[in-house]
Amino acid sequence: MAKQIQAIRGMNDCLPEQTPAWQQAEAVLRDLMRAYGYAEVRMPIMEVTGLFKRAIGEVTDVVEKEMYTFDDRNGDSMTLRPEGTAGCVRAGIEHGLLYNQERRMWYMGPMFRYERPQKGRYRQFHQFGVEVFGLQGPDIDAELIMLTARLWKTLGVSEHLVLQLNSLGQPEERAEYRQALVAYLEQHKDQLDEDSQRRLYTNPLRVLDSKNPQVQALLQDAPVLSDYFGEQTQAHFEGLKALLTSAGIGFEINPRLVRGLDYYNLTVFEWVTESLGAQGTVCGGGRYDGLVEQLGGQATPAVGFAMGMERLVLLLDTLNQVDAQPALADVYLAMMGDNSQVAGFALAEQLRDQLPGLRVMSHCGGGNFKKQLKRADKSGAGIALILGEDEIARGEVTVKYLRGQGEQQTLAVNDMIEQLKKGI
C-alpha cells in the first residue's frame, strides 16, 4: 500500500464537528465590526519578504526564526505572511487609502510562523485583526479596547479576561530608556538566560517580557520606561485611562508589557486569561504611528489589534461557551420507489425557491424506508417529507414530525409549502 500522507506538523484540519465553534466566533466578530462601522479588507497571504523585514524588524524572532520564506521561480524572495498589519498598511499605501483619510478596517485569515506547535499555537494559525488609520488621540485607542470588551461580553467570557495596559512612549523616549536599560542589564549579564543575552543589544525591551523567573526578579530594580515619558506621552496615556475608567472597563498597568514587533509606540494592551494555562494572551494590540511612513507612505497615525482565532475558539470551548451543534437540515426529503427521485429533486428545488431560508437535505444513495428515516433523524431535521409513487400520483407529500411536534399527515404539495411558511 502507498504511504499515507498526513497534514504538515502544526497545520491542522478543521473538521465538520469543529467548524460550528469557528462559525459562531466569526459571526459575532462580523456583527461587531458592522455595529462599529468598520469595513473588511482582504490581503494576499504571500508578500515580498522585504515588507516584513522593514515592518517587523530584522532582529526580531519573527524575521530571524519564524517566517516561511522562499525564492520563487524568478529568484525573488517571498514570505507567507506571519502577521496582518504590514500587509494591511502596504495595501493602504498602494491603493491610496490612507493619506489625509480616516480608515477603520478589519481582516480575518491564515498566518504562518515556523515555531514549536503547542495547544493554541500552530504553524498555520488564523488571526482576526483591526487597523485604524488617520486618528491620533487616545479616544480611538479607547474605542478599540471598548470594542474588544464588548466582544468578550457577547461571547460570555468577560469574567475570565483581564486587560493589561502600558505605554511604550515615543521612539526618542524609548531610545533614551533603552540606553539606561542596557546599562543596567550589562551589570547583571551573567544572571541573564541565553535568550535575554541574545536580545540585550538587538531588542532589549523584549527582555522585559522574559518568562524566566530569575530574569523577572532581576528586573525588579531595572529602570522604568514611564520615567522617560514627556508631557505629551503622559497626557495620551492619562487620557486613555480616563476614557476606559468612565466606560467601566477595568485594567492593570503592566510596565513590562511590550510588543515583539518594532513598529509600536505609545499605547500597548493585551487581554489575558488564566483559563488557558501558559498560553494566556487572547488579544493584543497598540499604536504604531511610524509604520506607514516606514513602508513608504506619508506619515499617518495608526492603531490596531489582533487575536488568534484558534486561541479564542479554545477559550470558548474551555469555558463551555460553544453553542450546541446545529442541525444540518430543517427538512429531510425521503424518496421511495423507482420514479421518486426525479420528482423528489424537483420538489426540493421548489422548496428552496419558495422558502430561501429553509435548509432542505435530499436523500441520496438509495436504501429502504427505515434507513432513510434513520438518516433523516441523524441530520437533525425536525421534519421528514416522504415522497412515494402514490404521493407523486396524487400530487401530495407525507409530513412526518421527527421531534414530537405533531401527528403524521399527508398534504397537497402547495398546502405543505404553506404550512412550512408558517413555521411548522
Image: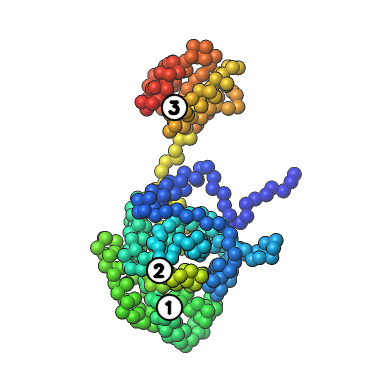
Element under disc 1: helix
Q: Identify the element where label 3 is drawn.
A: helix
Q: Give the residue furthest to the right.
A: 1
Residue for point 60% across, 17% down: 338
Asked if the residue at tag 3 contacts the one at tag 2, i.e. Cβ–Cβ closer than 8 Å, the answer is no
> Picture quarter containing residue 169?
bottom left
Q: Position of residue 154 (x, y in %)?
A: 35, 50
Cα separation, mark 1 vs mark 2, equals 14 Å
Q: Are marks 1 and 3 in contact (CB under 8 Å)?
A: no
The residue labelled by disc 3 is 354
Describe residue 6's horizontal placement relative to residue 256 as left or right.
right
In the figure, is residue 329 to the left or right of 371? left
Residue sitting at the far left = 246
Mark 1, residue position: 171
Residue 165 position by quadrant: bottom left
Residue at 47% x, 74% y is: 206
Instruction: Kindly tell me whether residue 119 is visible in this rendering.
Output: no
Disc 1 residue type? Pro
Disc 3 crowd, CA 10 A, few/some/many (<14, 14-19, 20+) = few
State how far apart marks 1 and 3 are (Cα). 62 Å
Return the residue at label 2: 301
Of the image marks 2 and 3, the number of the one nearer the N terminus: 2
